[in-house]
Amino acid sequence: MQTTGCGTAIITPFREDGSIDSQAFTSLVQWQIASGIDFLVVCGSTGEAATLDQDEWLQAISIVVTAAAGRVPVWAGCTHNSTRTLLKMAAHLPGTGISGVLSASPYYNKPSQEGQFQHFSALAQAIAPLPIILYNVPGRTGVNLLPATVARLAAAHSNIQAIKEASGNLAQFQELIRLLPPTFRIFSGDDNLAVAAIEAGGHGLVSVASNEIPAQLTAMVRAALNHDWPAARAIEHKYMPLLEANFWESNPGPVKTLLNRMGRCSQTLRLPLVPPSESTQRRLEQLATELGLLPA
């Protein structure tokens, strides 16, 4: 996998009736690409993938692949806590035009390291040679995918080629860099650790905040990859309050609130997610206005 840089874990815009808003979705993709984003990730946790049925999941992937039209790579989220169900889902992905499959550890079951190894091994064998990007997000799944297990998976399956590491643990990120070969791509899954992760040897960022500020975060990541640390840190310092604000309440609630105020989509979320509280929305609007994302 040759991909590096900043990728957006793009939201899934819904109409007020709860259906996917294909027009807003296409417009978002076009804006992201025009802003210089390096790749897109559809149907991740920020895309509320867990609330989509199979037809909607495939519809979302199709919308993004069609809108991107080969200009940037598109990764598709494919996660389930049942390996058997995961393989049935993944069987639909070859031939869709995606560049890779992003798959998180099984949630709720809390499998061991051996269980995770066998789970991802089954996926790799089922969809080879389509590349797989592992997704370690223990705050959502309840289980940590350890660097030694990642290294074992990479050695066993040539199409396991990258990881989105969102443990929030920089020491674990550094251990991944130490254990994995240079060709294996290691992306930060935490906006607020992206510059530090790249400085440690990472290859980029899969971002939530680039939904709102794609040009700015792409510039930050590229500066870091070019070892222009003053430029990277200047952007990071300016937007750090926004990177943190996106998690004042459950993601993607804050992101959708701001994108709605920016006129790019509705604020609609799928239950069990609900919009942020009125007080949080006011704080988000004030911060976005201070950063120049909304008119004063």
Image (cartoon, rainbow, N blue to C red):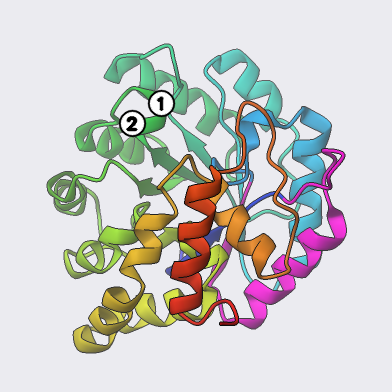
Provide the secondary structure element on which disc 2 rests: helix
- Residues in magenta? 13-42
**Residue 178 location in percent, x, y?**
14, 52
From the viewer's perspective, tell me whether residue 52 is left or right of residue 156.
Answer: right
What is the number of callouts on the image? 2
**Residue in the image at 63% along x and 70% along y:** 72
User: For the point 47% across and 68% down, which residue is it?
Assistant: 286
From the viewer's perspective, tell me whether residue 126 is left or right of residue 19.
Answer: left
Is residue 51 visible in the rendered image? The answer is yes
Residue closer to the observer: 151 or 254: 254
User: What residue is disc 1 on?
Assistant: 141
> Relative to residue 39, is residue 145 drawn left or right?
left
- Specify whether residue 3 is in view: no
Residue position marked by numbered label 2 in the rendering: 138
Q: Which amino acid does label 2 sit on?
A: Pro
Specify whether 91 is left or right of 287. Answer: right
Q: In this view, does 75 lie above or below 90?
A: below
Cβ atoms at labels 2 and 1 below 8 Å apart: yes
Query: How many neighbours does mark 2 have within 10 angstroms: few (below 14), some (14-19), or many (20 or more)?
Result: some
Return the x and y of residue 106 as percentages of the image width and height. Answer: 46, 22
- Residue 287 lies, with reference to residue 48, above or below; the image says below
